[in-house]
């Protein structure tokens, strides 16, 4: 695998900032990212570019379909190129998107979300039979995406739900389906961290400039503490998602997304309180962050579902994880 | 303010394995009553065994018997000892902050006198900061040192002094002048806890055990040679000391044992809420662990991560109290201090001592303000 030198990465980051800063917050940012080479970088250096790109998308609350790229790349380094642009990934609300039944000749039932308002020619998803995970490709004829009128219309969420007959199903047994939830939870954790960092910045700034009782509201302990709580939560999430690249990625990415969603929830609540009534308005952009965070929390398992998942693996082990590691005792 | 993500390198991981092997051999599980965090039992013989391995005074200079090891290496050892519930009470404070303070600002004579004995696991220290009228507002301390021939005469009262009834020395923050800048009037002095004029009154915890004390100084003579650092520099010195005190694993590993033992004894019968609690706890442990490790790494890089350390302490102690509260709510057992079940004993111990978690080392209200100050800077 080739690596990217620091200088190239710096240029990429600067370009990324410039390009994304100009984007309309309701317009999908994927094409702009592809143009500056996101998919090429993703293929060679995912650990460098995923944190960068996903955090920025979160900070600027930009909609995109890069989660598809992340999922495809986790299956194949050159994922997007291999699968093609008219193929979408069906992202699960929980860990997996579908179930297949071998006894009925690989019929697959599915219930998942497609990003970006697309009606793809075909759809890739992860399906399970018991503990066995498989990558499944469905023909577009087998699915009928329905637009979700959810709380965050900019994401263009489409719900796909149904059962595909064997004639429309291809099982890709050579691909490691387990890589997808790991990669996507990690990416979502970075995006949630980005959203939270922005909410924190808004509240911190507001606490400095908003004056009441003759002083900036940030001088009051009750306000300071709300802001400090968000800071602590987001930093803890950040160090765990960073760690998930190197050790025990499975439980670490579960923990990372769990912490990131928790931090975003604390931020949604506390920053709203600090901003006061203006935070409730459509006029202020805080609402975009709060809504985006709530939707991202649901993908690949909510904070609560992920807690349960981690807890169940601890129950199986019969021991708490040692500091810094999960797999040994 | 940043927390840089960091990981243990191979040398540090090898040290971790050494400590795990040592504990499994010397102090096998079931052969001793584990303690919760830094409130672990005091056992000078065990402290000296650790010292013989080079695991006490690790961060102190080699010429005084220390290890010249990095803060991260000390972190690794501390984490393993706490996770095991080892009896570390005797040397903990000396190793964590009194020794490093003396190494940094002490005179060559003080270093010679104290550091080798600290590194052998012999000497134990208490921290003399809080007073009856100076808690969160530490700069208001009123214990007074008055100039006399060859030294100072100290009068006043320190309170919430952990372990003073058993320890050898205390490093007390005292007022040495009435300078207009109240910070400039503060200095730190070494006092022998058995010196004439020192009275120690234990303050029992709500479980009846004694860890906190009131320490009263009445005309206690402190020689010039026992002043720590330059006169008037006490405030700056304790800022640094609190970074050692606050950022370490002591602050988030006290309840780890309670959960671990719960899993051992009741792992088969866990229901949904308890499973979620365990998952949430594991995730937060990882977060705290990594933040805490990054504080140790920052100390090695000659940073002064005092705001970060305050944050780790704040998050850690709050986490531990929340966790215990949740466990208590979900687990249907009587926490009994003399129960045959180790889990029930640990839970009882933790419930009764946990109110202190959010007080020692700075109350969480103060720490959040320190953290918020760092945010706006």
Image (cartoon, helix red, strand yellow):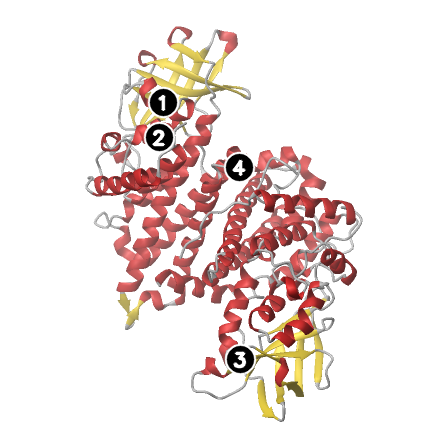
Which structural element holds mark 2? helix
Marks 4 and 3 close (CB-CB < 8 Å): no
As drawn, the label of residue A247 is 4
Which structural element holds mark 1? helix
Residue A271 appearing in the image: yes
* Residue topped by disc 1: A79
Look at the picture and state if B344 lies above or below A48: below
Marks 2 and 1 close (CB-CB < 8 Å): yes
Q: Quadrant of residue B358?
A: bottom right
Marks 3 and 2 close (CB-CB < 8 Å): no
Look at the picture and state if B66 lies above or below A312: below
Residues marked 3 and 2, same chain? no
* Image position of B277 (left or right of A303): right
> What residue is drawn where x is 45% and y is 39%?
A257
Residues marked 4 and 2, same chain? yes
Residue B99, percent across and down?
63, 67
> What residue is drawn where x is 60% and y is 71%?
B102
Q: Residues within 10 Å of mark 2 (few under 14, many from 20)?
A: many
* Residue topped by disc 2: A42
Task: Tell me the subunit letter for badge 4.
Answer: A
Q: Which is more N-terminal, label 4 or label 1?
A: 1
Look at the picture and state if A113 lies above or below B77: above
As drawn, the label of residue B230 is 3
Which structural element holds mark 4? loop
Q: Nearer the viewer, residue A75 or B260?
A: A75
Q: Which is more N-terminal, label 2 or label 4?
A: 2
Residue B76, percent across and down?
61, 50
Q: CA distance from mark 4 to mark 2?
A: 20 Å
Residues marked 2 and 1, same chain? yes
> What residue is drawn where x is 54% and y is 78%?
B134
Residue A178, percent across and down?
49, 25
């Amino acid at each position: 695998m080739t690596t990217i030198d620091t200088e190239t990465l710096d240029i990429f980051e600067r370009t990324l900032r410039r390009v994304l800063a100009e984007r309309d917050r309701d317009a999908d940012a994927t094409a702009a990212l592809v143009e500056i080479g996101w998919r090429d970088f993703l293929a060679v250096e995912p650990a460098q570019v995923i944190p960068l790109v996903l955090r920025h998308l979160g900070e600027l609350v930009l909609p995109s379909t890069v989660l598809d790229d992340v999922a495809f790349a986790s299956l194949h380094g050159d994922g997007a190129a291999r699968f093609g642009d008219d193929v979408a990934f069906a992202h699960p609300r929980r860990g997996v998107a579908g179930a297949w039944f071998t006894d009925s000749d690989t019929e697959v039932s599915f219930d998942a979300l497609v990003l970006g308002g697309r009606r793809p020619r075909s759809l890739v998803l992860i399906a399970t039979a018991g503990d066995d995970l498989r990558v499944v490709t469905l023909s577009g004829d087998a699915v009928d995406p329905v637009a979700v009128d959810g709380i965050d219309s900019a994401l263009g969420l489409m719900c796909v739900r149904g059962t595909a007959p064997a004639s429309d199903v291809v099982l890709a047994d050579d691909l490691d389906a387990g890589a997808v939830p790991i990669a996507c939870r990690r990416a979502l954790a970075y995006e949630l961290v980005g959203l939270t960092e922005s909410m924190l910045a808004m509240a911190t700034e507001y606490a400095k400039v908003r004056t009441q009782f003759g002083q900036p509201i940030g001088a009051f302990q009750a306000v300071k503490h709300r802001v400090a709580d968000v800071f602590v939560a987001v930093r803890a999430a950040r160090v765990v998602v960073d760690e998930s690249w190197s050790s025990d990625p499975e439980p670490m990415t579960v923990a990372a997304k769990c912490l990131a969603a928790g931090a975003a929830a604390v931020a949604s609540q506390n920053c709203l309180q600090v901003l006061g009534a203006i935070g409730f308005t459509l006029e202020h952009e805080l609402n975009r962050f709060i809504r985006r965070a709530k939707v991202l929390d649901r993908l690949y398992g909510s904070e609560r579902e992920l807690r349960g998942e981690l807890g169940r693996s601890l129950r199986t082990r019969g021991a708490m994880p040692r500091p810094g590691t999960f797999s040994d005792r | 303010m940043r927390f840089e993500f960091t990981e243990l390198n191979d040398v540090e991981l090898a040290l971790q394995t050494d400590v795990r092997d040592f504990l499994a051999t010397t102090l096998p599980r079931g052969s001793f009553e584990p303690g919760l965090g830094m409130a672990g039992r005091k056992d000078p013989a065990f402290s000296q065994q650790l010292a013989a391995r080079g695991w006490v005074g690790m961060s102190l200079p080699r010429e005084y018997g220390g290890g010249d090891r990095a803060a991260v290496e000390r972190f690794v050892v501390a984490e393993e000892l706490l996770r095991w519930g080892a009896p570390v009470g005797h040397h903990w404070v000396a190793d964590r902050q009194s020794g490093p303070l003396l190494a940094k600002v002490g005179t060559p004579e003080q270093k010679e006198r104290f550091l080798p004995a600290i590194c052998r696991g012999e000497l134990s220290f208490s921290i003399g900061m809080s007073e009856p009228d100076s808690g969160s507002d530490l700069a208001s301390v009123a214990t007074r040192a008055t100039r006399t021939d060859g030294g100072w005469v100290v009068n006043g009262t320190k309170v919430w002094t952990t372990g003073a009834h058993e320890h050898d020395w205390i490093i007390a923050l005292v007022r040495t002048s009435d300078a207009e800048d109240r910070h400039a009037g503060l200095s730190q002095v070494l006092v022998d806890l058995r010196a004439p004029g020192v009275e120690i009154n234990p303050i029992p915890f709500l479980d009846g055990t004694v860890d906190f004390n009131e320490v009263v100084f009445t005309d206690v003579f402190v020689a010039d040679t026992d002043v720590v650092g330059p006169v008037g520099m006490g405030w700056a010195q304790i800022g640094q000391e609190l970074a050692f005190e606050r950022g370490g694993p002591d602050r988030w590993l006290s309840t780890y044992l309670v959960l671990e033992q719960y899993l051992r004894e009741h792992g088969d019968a866990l229901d949904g809420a308890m499973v979620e609690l365990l998952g949430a706890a594991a995730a937060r442990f990882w977060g705290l662990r990594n933040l805490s490790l990054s504080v140790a790494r920052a100390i090695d890089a000659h940073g002064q991560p005092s705001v970060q350390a305050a944050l780790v302490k704040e998050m850690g102690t709050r986490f531990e109290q929340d966790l215990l509260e949740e466990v208590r709510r979900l687990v249907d057992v009587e926490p009994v201090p003399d129960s045959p079940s180790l889990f029930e004993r640990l839970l009882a111990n933790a419930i009764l001592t946990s109110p202190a978690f959010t007080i020692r080392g700075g109350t969480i209200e103060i720490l959040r303000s320190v953290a918020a100050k760092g945010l706006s800077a």
